[in-house]
Amino acid sequence: MKRKGISYLYEKKAKGEKMARTALYDYPMACIAEEAGIDIINVGDSIAMVTFGYEDTLGAKLDVMVEHAKAVRRGAPSAFIMGDMPFGSYQTSDADAVRNAARYMTEAGMDCVKIEGGEEIIPLIKRLTQASIPVIAHSGLTPQAVNLLGGYKTQGRNSEAAYKLIQNALAFEEAGAICVLLESIPQEVAKEVYARLTVPFLGTGVGPYSDAPMINIYDFLGYSEKTPKFAKKYADAKSLSVEAAKTFVKEVKDGTYPAPEHCYKMADGEHEKLLELLKA
């Protein structure tokens, strides 16, 4: 299947066709997404929480994320894949940001990088774009700023905050962002953003008004203990996995596994020869 690029996103946007988007971090899940026809994959810094068990995304490290991004690209060769710039990888300086973003592009084959923030990231969007690095601007609920925000709270609930979100989204586009991503905002605000942006609008918990709604693959497969309000569970893979593991434990303990069909055997006559060698 042909690899989806920026032009694919823009063609879908122009036609008013929705794109399916998810977040994942490893080769097996990427293979599932590829076979299912997921359009956009986010190698998210949420890996810190989902895969490594941290309380927030701040524990994500660039070296680890680049390696996981490589695995995702191998598993989903046709998807449009964005690599999250983890906390500390772009806030220190523009030079650090360009250097670290370039790693995603050259080492992991990402289609773009994603950075979080408000109006303060506009100069960086311009700098990354000047360096030929496609960038997606992420605002609204920005998990890397969870300590400033006072938790994972819906953003833009009042008119002034909503107006600022809309203005920032338009400024991101003007600065060169290839897409704008907003997370956890009221659908009324998302509707206004959707009507005004010309670049694709990626929505995470924004209601129906976006070009590419997103649910983390571990959420929609039912692996997560807690899920955000916007996440719909499409399967209960965790229960199936636990039952399979319980059956494995039982069969190991009662001797049912491994059965003869799970065992390797020597070539005909070789066991007898081995016994003779052992006697010598």
Image (tube, rainbow, N blue to C red):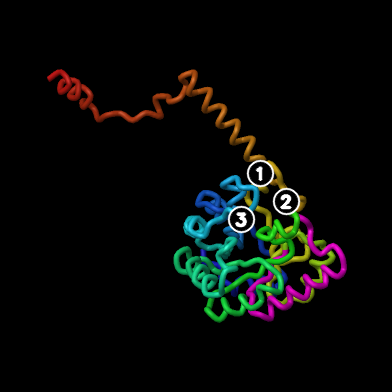
Asked if disc 2 and disc 3 are in contact, CB closer than 8 Å, the reply is no
Of helix, strand and loop, which one carries label 1? loop
7 part of magenta stretch: no
- Specify few, some or many for label 2: CA neighbours under 10 Å numbering under 14, 14-19, or 20 or more: some
Using the image as rendered, state which of residue 65 and residue 267 is in the foreground. 65
Q: Amino acid at mark 2?
A: Ala
Please give left or right for residue 269 compared with residue 27 in the image: left
Residue 76 seen: no
Q: Which mark is residue 231?
A: 2
**Place of residue 121 in the rendered image (x, y in percent of width and height, measured from the top left):** 65, 73
Q: Which residue is mark 1?
A: 224
What residue is pinned by disc 3?
58
Whether 26 is drawn above or below 5: the answer is above
Separation of marks 3 and 1 at Cα, in angstroms? 19 Å
Mark 2 or mark 3: whose residue is earlier in sequence: 3
Q: Secondary structure at mark 3?
A: helix
Badge 3 crowding class, 10 Å Cα cut-off, few under 14, some 14 to 19, many 20 or more, is some
- Residue 161, magenta (yes or no): yes
Q: Residue at x 68, y 41 (%)?
A: 225
In the image, the segment drawn in magenta is: 153-182
Q: Give me the C-alpha separation between circle 2 and circle 3.
A: 22 Å
Q: State whether residue 180 is above or below residue 30.
A: below
Residue farthest to the left, as pictured: 280
Q: Amino acid at mark 1?
A: Ser
x, y percentage for residue 82? 58, 64
Query: In front here: 38 or 133?
Result: 133
